[in-house]
Amino acid sequence: MDPELRTLAENARGFMPSDEGQALYRAALAAADAVPGLPLVEIGTYCGKSTVYLGAAARSRGATVVTIDHHRGSEENQAGWEHHEPDLVDPELDVMDTLPTFRRTMFRAGLEGVVTAVVGDSPTVAQWWSTPAALVFIDGGHGEEPAATDYRCWSPVVAPGGLLAIHDVFPDPAEGGRPPFEQIYVPALESGEFTEVDSVGSLRVLRRVVPET
Ligand code: SAH
Ligand code: MG
């Protein structure tokens, strides 16, 4: 990965450790190579840290990234919760707004020509979305219902041979919340439509099986 972008990603705000970011970057390269011409789709932009890894890979392959977020934060980002960052609150509305920080991240990374941001609620966007993706990275709401909904809405978007990456997968409940594991990772494997190809920290990367003809 371009060393400047790597440093920028590592210093960007967000919750993705460097080794997982690198694994995401490699997955994005592999996906763009396996299924050329299709976008890489991210559910859960936050401030764009993971988007830099995806964007760096997309740029080097002539691909594009679409990143989707309502920018109002997940439950765990709200005031009083573990992952709250008070300076990400819009002072006029007193609600979270991560869009300005995300835009700064993309500008600094020089990725504005590679990344398209969709500001909206993930299931609402899924209602009109119809483009297959080389990679779908699910890192949105981590509650049971949002995780299940993201699996239902976005796993079908992964093209045959493309990749489904899932963040914050914790098989051991002592290490973290369960929904990404229970509502996304396990159902994807049990569906028989995906096989695991990589696992780094809490990141899992699955490949959509190509149907035999
Ligand atoms: N991928 C980011 C972190 C994402 S944090 C990184 O690694 O840097 C999870 C994000 O999911 C939050 O920004 C939150 O606003 C978003 N989110 C939660 N529920 C959502 C929903 N229903 N629709 C769109 N975005 C949602
Ligand atoms: Mg995450």
Image (cartoon, grey):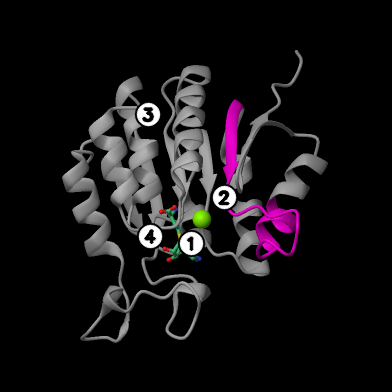
Does residue 104 belong to the magenta stretch?
no
Q: CA distance from mark 1 to mark 4?
A: 18 Å
Write down the residue under mark 4.
46
Quadrant containing the N terminus is top left
User: What's under tag 2, amino acid-wise?
Assistant: His
Q: Which mark is residue 167?
A: 2
- Disc 1 on helix, strand or loop? helix
Binning the other alpha carbons within 10 Å of mark 1 as few (below 14), some (14 to 19) or many (20 upward) gives few
Taking the spot 59% from the left edge, 56% from the top edge, the residue there is 150
- Give, as a three-letter code, the residue at label 4: Tyr
Task: Name which of mark 1 and mark 2 comes first in the sequence.
Answer: 1
Q: Residues within 10 Å of mark 2 (few under 14, many from 20)?
A: many
- The Cα atoms of the two marked residues, 4 and 2, are separated by 13 Å
Residue drawn at (27%, 56%), measured in percent from left and top? Answer: 102
Q: Which residue is mark 1?
A: 124
Q: In the image, is the residue at mark 4 within 8 Å of ligand 1 by its beta carbon? A: yes
Q: Are marks 1 and 3 in contact (CB under 8 Å)?
A: no
Label 2 CB less than 8 angstroms from ligand 2: yes
Q: Which mark is residue 57?
A: 3
Q: CA distance from mark 2 to mark 3?
A: 18 Å
Does the residue tagged 1 have its C-beta within 8 Å of any atom of ligand 1?
yes
Q: Earlier in the sequence, mark 3 or mark 4?
A: 4
Assess disc 4: are there few (<14), some (14-19) or many (≥20) residues with their C-alpha within 10 Å of its C-alpha: many
